[in-house]
Amino acid sequence: MTNKLNWNQINRVPWASHHWEGIDGTRVKAHILTTPRVVEYLPFPTNYKSDLSAAEVRGTLSNAHGAATDHLPICYGYGAGGGGPTEELISKAHASSAMPGMPRFAISTVKAWMDATDVPEGQFHAGEHYMEVHRGVHLPRVDQTGQQEGRTGPP
């Protein structure tokens, strides 16, 4: 699950939810977040830390493309880096669900959402998901302890 592929300036992933086939032939479910956020220099801007405003909640559904859009995730929380949802955001989620015409919320996990989502077999992308804005950027590989590969000294 990501929103960063929506930062592409030219090539858009054609489905919000799809199967992604890696170079080894393995398929996994994938989802590109659809919660809108206005960013002047991005043609398809979305976000992963929604403030759960009515525009963002409704926009999550209207921005979705492809099948499997009857229930969609909205990632919300305070700040980047793991701040998490605040009491205010949780209250907004409950209040929004009670408003006529608004989508219903189910607070869940990414795994539970992926397990419950049926993605049509025809919605699949084979090979690399190319992120255009990372052209020429070196991203060091980090192991699960947070240590950079090849590093010889302390972090």
Image: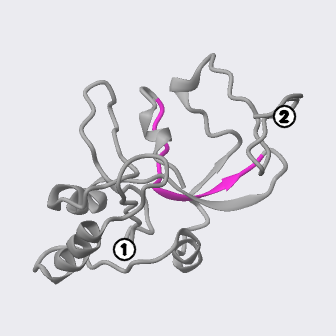
Query: From this viewpoint, which residue is outermost toward the top?
Result: 136
Q: Residue at horizontal 42%, vertical 61%? A: 84
Camera-side residue of 37 and 25: 37
Q: Residue at horizontal 69%, vertical 61%? A: 28
Q: Give me the disc on residue 152.
A: none
Camera-side residue of 20 and 81: 81
Mark 2 surroundings: few (<14), some (14-19) or many (≥20) residues within 10 A: few
Q: Answer left or right for 93 relative to 142.
A: left
Q: Which residue is mark 1?
A: 70
Distance between the alpha carbons at the discs numbered 1 and 2: 41 Å
Question: The residue tagged with tag 2: helix, strand or loop?
Answer: loop
Residue 143 placed where, x, y %? Answer: 79, 45
Q: Amino acid at mark 1?
A: Asp
Residue 95 placed where, x, y %? Answer: 17, 78
> Mark 1 or mark 2, which has the lower sequence index?
1
Camera-side residue of 112 and 129: 112
Residue 87 placed where, x, y %? Answer: 28, 71
* 93 versus 85 height, above or below: below
Which image quadrant for residue 37?
Answer: top left
Q: Amino acid at mark 2?
A: Glu
In the rendered structure, does residue 20 fall within the stretch colored magenta? yes
User: Where are the magenta residues, as a range?
Assistant: 11-22
Q: Which residue is mark 2?
A: 149
Query: From this viewpoint, which residue is outermost toward the left?
Result: 100
Residue 93 placed where, x, y %? Answer: 25, 73
Question: The residue tagged with tag 1: helix, strand or loop?
Answer: loop
